[in-house]
Image (spheres, rainbow, N blue to C red):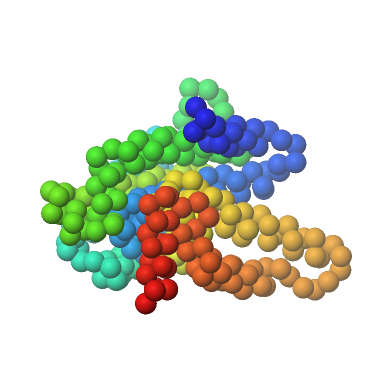
């Protein structure tokens, strides 16, 4: 119980946050998006943090989940299966796409895996842009229907329902990943990350383990994409699923700490809170005092400086896993001795 006290306190705060009077509809929508991106960051953490595979195309699976949801629910197509079946289809479909990408690249390592996933992300972006008969191109698919519930909830008029949907889904994902961390599969992921050759000699099927990491990470990205599209009432255009988004999510893990659920969550809240909440608030405050300076003009400079300082003085991140922290410190000590 003591071990999970912090998690329970955090969950309680998130449950009560939308009910506070100072939380406006705009701020509530931004908090909802942060929860969705927490799921996306956790999906990438499975591949990069647990398994040590550099994945630079997570936004592609995010987009696959969003567009599967859109195709299966909008009135433009004859399917119109509703949100819940589409959510399952988006998760499974993105997971299958992850398997299809990973299967022929399992023997690749390091930079080669990164290049393949980067290229896949570009393929998906241009496919979304050019397959206008299916994706509507840059216009996106819209409107997406609200989730069906046995109660008559006004989803379009109240951001709180989408907020709690994202929070509940995030809680389920966290419980799933906590259990996987301590399972045979979770230990195999970490063994592959630390030393693939040694893990293989101990009887671990490296190809199968990598494939499972890609599949689960991609499935969680598709799940996040389905929630993102439905909460926005549209799939977003191809510019919503670019390489820049993949790098941003990777930065969540770098800042928060790879290989750790708490680190992925912390990094997402810190960076998205800085970009979506703190920066506009500071801009409004600066405008009120009558100056032409905009904090948003220098936000990337501050972000880049923070990233450089983090890599220099705390490369393991704010809340790293114990194993990753030990690996980082061992690497720094070896570098210092040489």
Q: Is residue 335 above or below residue 276?
A: below
Q: In this image, 18 relative to 112: left or right?
A: right
Res 7 seen here: yes
- Closest to the observer, 158 or 9: 9
Image location (x, y in percent) of residue 107: 17, 63
Total numbered badges shown on the rendered structure: 0
Q: Is residue 243 above or below residue 162?
A: below
The residue drawn where x is 53% and y is 67% is 313
Task: Specify the quadrant that holds the C terminus.
Answer: bottom left
- Closest to the observer, 221 or 196: 196
Q: Residue furthest top?
A: 150
Figure quadrant of residue 25: top right
The residue drawn where x is 49% and y is 27% is 1
Figure quadrant of residue 60: bottom left
Q: Residue furthest right?
A: 289
Res 70 seen here: no
The residue drawn where x is 47% and y is 35% is 171
Q: Is residue 242 above or below residue 180?
A: below
Image location (x, y in percent) of residue 115: 30, 71
The residue drawn where x is 26% and y is 52% is 191
Q: In this image, 185 relative to 236: left or right?
A: left
Q: Residue furthest bottom?
A: 338
Image location (x, y in percent) of residue 213: 28, 50
Q: Is residue 11 above or below residue 244?
A: above
Image location (x, y in percent) of residue 12: 60, 32
């Amino acid at each position: 119980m003591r071990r999970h006290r912090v998690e329970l306190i955090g969950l309680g705060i998130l449950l009560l946050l939308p009910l506070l009077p100072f939380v406006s509809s705009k701020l509530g929508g931004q908090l909802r998006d942060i929860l969705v991106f927490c799921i996306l960051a956790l999906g990438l953490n499975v591949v990069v943090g647990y398994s040590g595979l550099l994945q630079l195309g997570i936004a592609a699976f995010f987009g696959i989940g969003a567009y599967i949801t859109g195709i299966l629910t909008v009135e433009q197509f004859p399917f119109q299966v509703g949100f819940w079946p589409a959510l399952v289809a988006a998760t499974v479909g993105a997971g299958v796409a992850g398997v299809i990408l990973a299967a022929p690249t399992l023997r690749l390592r390091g930079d080669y895996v990164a290049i393949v996933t980067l290229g896949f992300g570009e393929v998906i972006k241009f496919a979304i842009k050019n397959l206008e008969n299916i994706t509507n191109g840059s216009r996106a698919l819209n409107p997406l229907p609200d989730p069906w519930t046995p109660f008559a909830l006004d989803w379009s008029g109240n951001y709180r329902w989408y907020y709690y949907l994202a929070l509940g889904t995030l809680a389920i994902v966290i419980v799933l990943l906590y259990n996987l961390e301590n399972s045979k599969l979770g230990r195999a992921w970490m063994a592959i990350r630390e030393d693939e050759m040694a893990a293989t000699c101990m009887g671990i099927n490296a190809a199968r383990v990598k494939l499972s990491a890609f599949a689960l990470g991609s499935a969680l990205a598709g799940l996040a994409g389905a929630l993102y599209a439905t909460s926005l009432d549209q799939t977003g255009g191809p510019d919503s699923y670019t390489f820049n988004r993949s790098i941003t999510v990777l930065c969540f893990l770098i800042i928060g700490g790879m290989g750790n659920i708490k680190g992925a969550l912390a990094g997402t809240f810190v960076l998205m809170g800085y970009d979506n909440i703190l920066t506009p608030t500071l801009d409004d405050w600066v405008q009120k005092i009558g100056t032409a300076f905009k904090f948003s003009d220098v936000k990337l400079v501050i972000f880049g400086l923070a990233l450089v300082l983090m890599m220099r003085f705390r490369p393991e991140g704010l809340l790293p896993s114990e194993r990753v922290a030990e690996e980082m410190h061992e690497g720094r000590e070896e570098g210092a001795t040489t």
